[in-house]
Amino acid sequence: MAVEATIKVSSGVKGRLDALKIHPRETYNDVIERLTSMAIDSDPLTDDEFRGLEEAREDRRAGRTFTHDQVLAELGLE
């Protein structure tokens, strides 16, 4: 069931919505629906992904981290 509503957006947001249209006659509803469906990740984390995140958190807590500058220096990109 479609509900008709008016929303207020800035001209910048309207411009970005216009730029995201797949074709000129695509409606804002279609653009917003496409964007919102892309924003939702329906795939749950795998056990390996979850363990990897936990390991990363533990590394951070234990101070096993590097700054951006340290990584650049290590890679010779500074």
Image (tube, grey):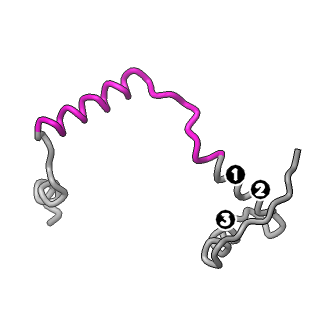
Residue 46 picture location, percent across and down: 44, 24
Left or right, 65 with reference to 57 = left
Q: Quadrant of residue 4?
A: bottom right
Of the residues shown, which amino acid type is indicated by label 2? Answer: Asp
Structural crowding at the residue carrying mark 1, measured as other residues with C-alpha within 10 Å and reported as few (<14), some (14–19) or many (≥20):
few
Query: Residue at left 61%, top 47%?
Result: 38
The residue tagged with tag 1: helix, strand or loop?
helix
Residue 49 picture location, percent across and down: 38, 28
Left or right, 10 with reference to 57 = right
* Residue range (magenta): 37-62
Query: Residue at left 12%, top 56%?
Result: 70
Camera-side mark, 3 or 2:
2
Q: Quadrant of residue 55?
A: top left
Quarter of the image with the C terminus in it: bottom left
Of the residues shown, which amino acid type is indicated by label 1? Answer: Arg
Estimate the spatial distance between the alpha carbons at disc 1 and disc 3, rounded to whole Å. Answer: 10 Å
Q: Is residue 6 magenta?
A: no
- Residue 68 marker: none
Disc 2: which residue: 30
Structural crowding at the residue carrying mark 3, measured as other residues with C-alpha within 10 Å and reported as few (<14), some (14–19) or many (≥20):
some
- Residue 34 marker: 1
Q: Residue furthest right?
A: 1
The residue tagged with tag 2: helix, strand or loop?
helix
Contact check, label 3 and label 2, Cβ < 8 Å: no
The residue tagged with tag 3: helix, strand or loop?
helix
| Precedes in sequence: disc 3 or disc 2 | 3
Of the residues shown, which amino acid type is indicated by label 3? Answer: Leu
Contact check, label 1 and label 3, Cβ < 8 Å: yes
Q: Is residue 41 magenta?
A: yes
Left or right, 6 with reference to 10 = right
Disc 3: which residue: 20
